[in-house]
Image (cartoon, rainbow, N blue to C red):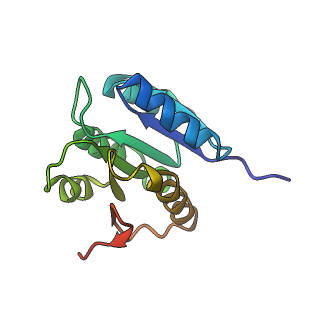
Amino acid sequence: MNAKPPLVLLVEDDADTATLYMAMLSAEGWLVVSCENGQTARDWCFNTQEPPQLMVLDVRLPDTSGVELCQELINALPGEYRPAVLMLSAHGDPRMPSRCREAGARAFLDKLRDLDRFVDTAKLLLEEQASLNNSRFYHVNLTEMPD
């Protein structure tokens, strides 16, 4: 019997970027739900019967901060259903990775520089999520960040 493919929630307001990420994730055989803003993501999360194993969130959304959305969704889901979170940003704020980590994200990638690491990072987070090894935080080059 084949295992059920991972479910990924993608929250990205730029349609072209969302299409690219959806294609990359779907090519791995993963199920992808795409939302263009925070409210749509909230509505989906609070009404779904199956929480995602991975959330991919843009830092800047039209109606909320991706950092705030990350924290809200993680805190709203019971511990055993909390997904891994990968945050994405095209804005070079050097404080953003630590803000994302504090909000509960497990990884941060720069959209402009790290596209080639996107799928590998998602795979790594899903593998760790499956084994419930949630103690690491990855930033850009997939090196462990110190606590």
Left or right for 28, reference 79: right
Of 9 and 73, the residue lying toward us: 9
Asked if one can make out residue 9 in the rendered structure from this viewpoint, the answer is: yes
Left or right for 18, reference 5: left
Left or right for 79, reference 92: right
Pick the quarter of the image with the C terminus. Answer: bottom left
Residue depicted at x 45% and y 30% = 18
Residue depicted at x 39% and y 50% = 86
Relative image position of residue 27 (x, y in whole percent): 65, 42
- Above or below residue 123? Residue 136 is below
Asked if one can make out residue 50 in the rendered structure from this viewpoint, the answer is: no
Left or right for 49, reference 61: right
Q: Residue furthest right?
A: 1
Quadrant in which residue 91 is drawn: top left
Relative image position of residue 112 (x, y in whole percent): 32, 45
Relative image position of residue 117 (x, y in whole percent): 45, 56
Q: Residue furthest bottom?
A: 146
- Above or below residue 20? Residue 142 is below
Relative image position of residue 15 (x, y in whole percent): 41, 23
Q: In this figure, what is the number of numbered marks?
A: 0
Of 7 and 22, the residue lying toward us: 22
Quadrant in which residue 138 is drawn: bottom left
Quadrant in which residue 140 is drawn: bottom left
Residue depicted at x 49% and y 56% = 80
